[in-house]
Amino acid sequence: MKRSTVELPSGTLQIELHEEQVPLESITTYAVRQNPRRGFLFVSKILGKHLPVRPSEALKHHRFLATSLPAQAEGPVLFIGMAETATGLATSIFEEYSKASGRQDVLYLPSTRYRLGDRSTLQFQETHSHATDHLIYPPESGPKKDLWDGAKTLVLIDDEITTGKTLKALTHTLKRQLPGLREVHLVCFTSWLDLPEEVLLEEFGLPVTIHALVKGNMAFEANPDFSPPELPKVIGNGEDKAPLIRHEYARLGRLPATEHLPEEVQSLVDNLPMQEKPILVLGTGEFAFEPLRFALALENKGHRVVFHTTTRSPILPGEVIQDRLEFMDNYGDQIPNYLYNHRPEQYSRIFVCFETLPTQQDQDLMELLKAEAVYF
């Protein structure tokens, strides 16, 4: 059993490792949240959210986790990814599971911070987060609704699980809506929810299996002398975002392999000449999987590519986070968004991917990032 201590300005993190499919230090480092409720952050080296990653390196770990799930799980199988951080990861695991198993009785939905029309929603909270409210849009008709209504196996995906409180809250919310649920699979890069099966059964109300690259326990002792700066605005204006979003890929339900890159994006992939330096592909907030797919397509053409996304998660510079750029979100909420450790001189081309309609603000952001906008 390996033990380690991580000293942060906000406190001390004690880690005890029980199982490593890969070395923890190869996939994770640490930072300080700008958040009085939780002063530490496990910063993934393979997620592409706070640090850039090669798309093929990210996909390798997505495939590992996807194939750890039982191919013959009782169906329909409902996958749910947690916003904002895990939307790209979760969609990718869903697609890789669907390919590997050949199953069609699978449905993917992410949680989201955004309202889309007057559709009914399920709501739950992520108590430790800087932005606590999550929405899920149950399908209203057709094959997606049939899969939702009949779901037997639930797969919940996040990048990291600490206490599991959010996933427990979501499971109990879904159990009230979907009485056919029989079991739960929790999927993540790092899980610190190392509890006996009988305890997980009692807390979740269903049998639970955890699939993770690393499993263990952790404890954090806050530094009483550390006081983070005040949290920025994190609550949106509650307006309908549907008119802003050009094409909705998943929030209303996604079936396997139903999407391809838009024609103009595929044309960019097909016609882009080889570059002297690497290419950076940036997703924006919850919009992560389609940009990841774009980055993978470029890499498959022989380009050197890294993938990264903007985020609304405020992290304090220090440790692995050397600096941060701050700018307003592209959904009209006037919420600060961030990009960490941005080094434009490292890249020949920088593409920022949007699911929202073009605005002058986008052009201002392109100047700030020394980038080009790509609209999906």
Image (cartoon, grey):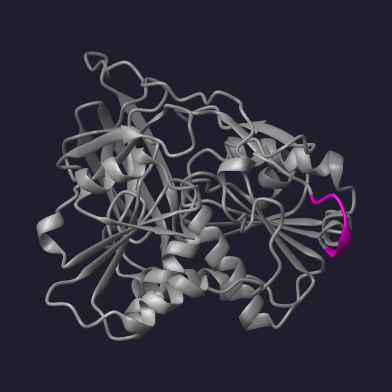
The boundaries of the magenta stretch are 139-143
Magenta highlight: main SS: loop
Q: Is residue 239 left or right of residue 286?
A: right
- State the residue in front, 324 or 164: 324
In the picture, measured across the screen, residue 215 lies left or right of residue 365, that is right
Q: Residue at x 52, y 26 (%)?
A: 236
Picture quadrant of residue 230: top left
Find residue 294 and report its horizontal and vertical position in percent: 42, 70
Quarter of image, res 312: top left
Quadrant of the image occupied by residue 120 = top right
Q: Position of residue 17 (x, y in %)?
A: 38, 54
- Left or right: 234, with 364 as reference point: right
Mark count: 0
Answer above or below: position of 276 versus 163: below
Height in image: 220 above or below 270?
above
Percent x, y of residue 110: 62, 50
Residue beneath the point at 32% across and 57% down: 308
Where does the image place residue 313, in percent across and percent down from the top left?
38, 36
Q: Residue furthest front?
A: 360
Apparent side of residue 262 relative to residue 136 in the rendered image (left or right): left
Q: Quadrant of the N terminus?
A: bottom left
Residue 354 in view in this figure: yes
Pick the front one: 143 or 172: 143
255 part of magenta stretch = no
Q: Is residue 64 visible?
A: no
Q: Residue at x 15, y 55 (%)?
A: 344
Question: 269 or 189, which lies in front?
Answer: 269
